[in-house]
Amino acid sequence: MSERRLPQDFVATVELALSPATLPASDDRREVVDYDRIASAIVEAGTSRSCRLLETLAKRIADRIFAEFPASTVRIAITKPRPPTSSSVEAAAVELLISRDER
């Protein structure tokens, strides 16, 4: 059976770099970047349409993060557990480091 016919599991690890100018003036949680919103944006970007390459998925998620959050840099790693290969491979991964200026 073709790998593309089945739903695929991926793990996204995302780090945002924020400029000190975007940090909250107080110690109030309501003023910071909402982790739940970040997670929801990642899931939506990753499930909205299919893609063939881990690189495409990583770039799509990074673009979404830049569109919705004040990140100056995004580091994103997409890991695919147990990829179908002729050798025994535990996982395949791609990592991108993109600054807002490089998009």
Image: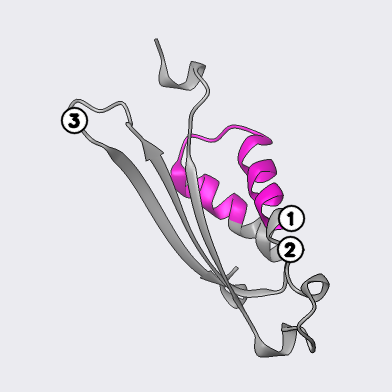
Residue at image location 52% in from the left, 69% down from the top: 98
Query: Does the magenta run of residues contain 80?
Result: no
| Residue with the mark numbered 3 | 88
Q: Residues within 10 Å of mark 2 (few under 14, many from 20)?
A: few
Separation of marks 3 and 2 at Cα, in angstroms: 38 Å
Mark seen at residue 67: none
Q: Amino acid at mark 2?
A: Asp
Q: Amino acid at mark 1?
A: Arg
The magenta span reads 37-61
Nearest the eye: 79 or 37: 37
Give residue 103's position: percent from left, percent from top: 60, 68
Quarter holding residue 23: bottom right
Q: Secondary structure at mark 1?
A: helix
Q: Earlier in the sequence, mark 1 or mark 3?
A: 1
Q: Residues within 10 Å of mark 3 (few under 14, many from 20)?
A: few
Mark 2 touches mark 1? (CB < 8 Å): yes
Q: Main secondary structure of the magenta part?
A: helix
Q: Nearer the viewer, mark 3 or mark 2?
A: 2
Q: Nearer the viewer, mark 1 or mark 3?
A: 1
Residue at image location 41% in from the left, 15% down from the top: 2
| Residue with the mark numbered 2 | 34
Q: Earlier in the sequence, mark 3 or mark 2?
A: 2
Q: How many marks?
A: 3
Residue at image location 65% in from the left, 51% down from the top: 39
In-image side of 101 versus 78 (left or right): right
Q: Residues within 10 Å of mark 1 (few under 14, many from 20)?
A: few
Give residue 53's position: percent from left, percent from top: 45, 40
Mark 3 touches mark 2? (CB < 8 Å): no
